[in-house]
Every structure is written in structure tokens, then in C-alpha cells.
């Protein structure tokens, strides 16, 4: 979910760039003094309304009963998922779920670490590790809640087997999603990795067998639909294509989503023992949630978010 290959390892220093999620940041046009003043007011407001719209937190908690949960702003499927929880599940636990879309993942994760949101749902565990390793943010995953369907699309060829020799395939350019794309091809029998390679961290350099001579074009997160016509195939999240109105027939290979890349419920580590977080877990891990993901006919969810698989 980013526009450049990301660093891994220990936390970066203040001189190094933040991890980039591939979304343009706003251009600040106000004077520095005004920025500080606005930030101070915003911080105070968030402190008063932490976790939701109410002004008082629950006993022994940093959060109110109105749980603010952040998600990727461009994802209609994540928004629809949170709306389902708010309508059908949360009332049984005496709380509400308010989804808040944020396009800048750095902001989203930092606000979660700071407790401005009780949780977020936009990242799998491999991406979360990249974030925490690269930035030092204190974030903890409580468990998988859904899986993003991830497929191969083409506007030029009607099946994976019909891709020509030397086909140019576009894949997302951050390490975790690069690995997921290559793993799809490996699981389909189209590539082979060197012995001992971790498929969840594989790069193009780890490919040992490439009988079809595939070449790879790297693209930013969300660029799949507009890249279709310039390559032979694109590997990306289904929701990107659904949101763009891509014809269903352009989906030429749709494997089951692996549990390794399931979307996590992520909180600020500081709040792991908060009593409201326990209630949050009851909502998200209610058994009805997985049944709904498997059977719903919501066009904003179906074929985009799937239940968590066993493998």
C-alpha cells in the first residue's frame, strides 16, 4: 500500500522520511503560527471526544461508548463493513461504531497509536510490521477480521493461461503487496521461488523459475484500474477495480485470499488493557461477523471483503 519500496529494520531517525502509503499529502498553506494554534485546538478536541462523539469516557477507560474506528478513505468496502457492525452488532454490546476515513496512512496509524481512534482496520500483519519497524509507532494487532480479495485483471486477455510469453504484469510496489502478488503467481504454478524463500516476503530477485518470461511493472497503491490498458495484466485488490467500475469480465484469476494477508483490527499498544478495547473485540469478533462476510449481497462488500480463511 505504498508508492515506493519501504525500509525495514529498526526505527528510523528523525532525518529519515516517514513510510509513504502512496497518497498525496495536503499542501500546508497557512502560516506556522496558525498551524500550531489549530493543532492545539484539535488536540484538545480529540482529548475530549476520544473514541467517539461523546464528551465523557467510560469508567476506567480512555474511550467513550462511541467507538471511532479509522479506515482507508478510498475503501467503500471497509466503510460498508463498519456500517454493518454499527447497525447489526455494536448495539448488542451497548456501543456504536463510527467509521472515519483517512487517506494518509501515516496519520491514520499515528492517531491510532495516540488513542485518537480506538482502532483501525486498514492493514494486514506484514504491512503493520513494515510500519512499526520503519516508524517506531506503538501499534498492536488484536486479530484478523476480514480478508481483501486480491485478483489478476486484464483488459487484453481472457485468462491467466492466455497471457503471452513475456507478459508485462503490473504489481503494487510496496514489499508486502509485491510479495502477495508474486505469491499468487507462484501458487498458480506460473513462477517458482528459490529454495528457502519466505513467500510472504518474496521479491522479484527471489524468483528462480519464470517459464513464461513475465516482466513486472511496479505501480502505486490504487493505480490498478488506470494501469490496465498499458500492461498485459494487473494484480491488485478487487475493491480498487470495483470502485473504478472495471467490467467483471476483466477479472481473469481470482484465488482464495490467504489468511497471511487478512485485515487486522489494530489498536495503540498503550490501550491493550483498556476495558473498552475488550468490548471492541467482542463486537469485531462476534461470530455473526464472519457469517455475514460469507453470505452478504451488499455490492460494496461482496467479492471485495471475504471472511477470514483457515489457511
Image: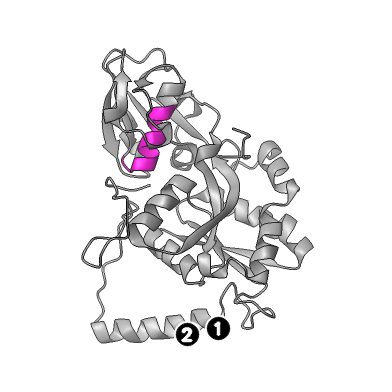
Q: Position of residue 246 (x, y in %)?
A: 44, 34
Tell me, yes or no, whether the highlighted magenta stretch contains residue 85.
Answer: no
Q: Residues within 10 Å of mark 1 (few under 14, many from 20)?
A: some
Q: Which quadrant of the structure image shows residue 219?
A: top left
Q: Position of residue 173 (x, y in %)?
A: 31, 40
The CA distance from mark 1 to mark 2 is 6 Å
Residue at image location 37% in from the left, 19% down from the top: 192
Q: Residues within 10 Å of mark 2 (few under 14, many from 20)?
A: few
Secondary element at image label 2 = helix
Instruction: Give the residue pinned by disc 2.
Output: 44
Q: Please report contact status of discs 1 and 2: CB closer than 8 Å, yes or no.
A: yes
Asked if one can make out residue 168 in the rendered structure from this viewpoint, the answer is yes
Residue at image location 67% in from the left, 70% down from the top: 275
Q: What segment is highlighted magenta in the picture?
A: 173-183
Residue at image location 26% in from the left, 29% down from the top: 205
Visual colour scheme? one colour
Q: Position of residue 285 (x, y in %)?
A: 69, 52
Asked if one can make out residue 230 in the rendered structure from this viewpoint, the answer is no
Residue 48, numbered label: 1
Front-lying residue, 78 or 205: 205
Amino acid at each position: 500500500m505504498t508508492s515506493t519500496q519501504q525500509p525495514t529494520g529498526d526505527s528510523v531517525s528523525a532525518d529519515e522520511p516517514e513510510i509513504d502509503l502512496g497518497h498525496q499529502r495536503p499542501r500546508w498553506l497557512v502560516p506556522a503560527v496558525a498551524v500550531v494554534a489549530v493543532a492545539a485546538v484539535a488536540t484538545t478536541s480529540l482529548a475530549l471526544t476520544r473514541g467517539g462523539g461523546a464528551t465523557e469516557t467510560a469508567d476506567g477507560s480512555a474511550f467513550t461508548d462511541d467507538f471511532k474506528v479509522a479506515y482507508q478513505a478510498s475503501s467503500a468496502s471497509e466503510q460498508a463493513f463498519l456500517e454493518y457492525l454499527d447497525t447489526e452488532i455494536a448495539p448488542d454490546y451497548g456501543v456504536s461504531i463510527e467509521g472515519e476515513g483517512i487517506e494518509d496512512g501515516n496519520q491514520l496509524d499515528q492517531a491510532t497509536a495516540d488513542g485518537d481512534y480506538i482502532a483501525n482496520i486498514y492493514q494486514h500483519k506484514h504491512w503493520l510490521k513494515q510500519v512499526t519497524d520503519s516508524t517506531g509507532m506503538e501499534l498492536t494487532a488484536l486479530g484478523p477480521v476480514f480478508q481483501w480479495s486480491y485478483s489478476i485483471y486484464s483488459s487484453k486477455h481472457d485468462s491467466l493461461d492466455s497471457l503471452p510469453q513475456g507478459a508485462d504484469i503490473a504489481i503494487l510496489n510496496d514489499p508486502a503487496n509485491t510479495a502477495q502478488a508474486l505469491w499468487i503467481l507462484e501458487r498458480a504454478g506460473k513462477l517458482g521461488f528459490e529454495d528457502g524463500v519466505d513467500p510472504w516476503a518474496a521479491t522479484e530477485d527471489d524468483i528462480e523459475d519464470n517459464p513464461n518470461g513475465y516482466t513486472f511493472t511496479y505501480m502505486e497503491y490504487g493505480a490498478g484500474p488506470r494501469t490496465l490498458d498499458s500492461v498485459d495484466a494487473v494484480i491488485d485488490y478487487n475493491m480498487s477495480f470495483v470502485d473504478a467500475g472495471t467490467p467483471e469480465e476483466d477479472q481473469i484469476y481470482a484465488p482464495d485470499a490467504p489468511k497471511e494477508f487478512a485485515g487486522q483490527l489494530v489498536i495503540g499498544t498503550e490501550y491493550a488493557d483498556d476495558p473498552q478495547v475488550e468490548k471492541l473485540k467482542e463486537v469485531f469478533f462476534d461470530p455473526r461477523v464472519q457469517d455475514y462476510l460469507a453470505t452478504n449481497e451488499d455490492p460494496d462488500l461482496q467479492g471485495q471483503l471475504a471472511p477470514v480463511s483457515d489457511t
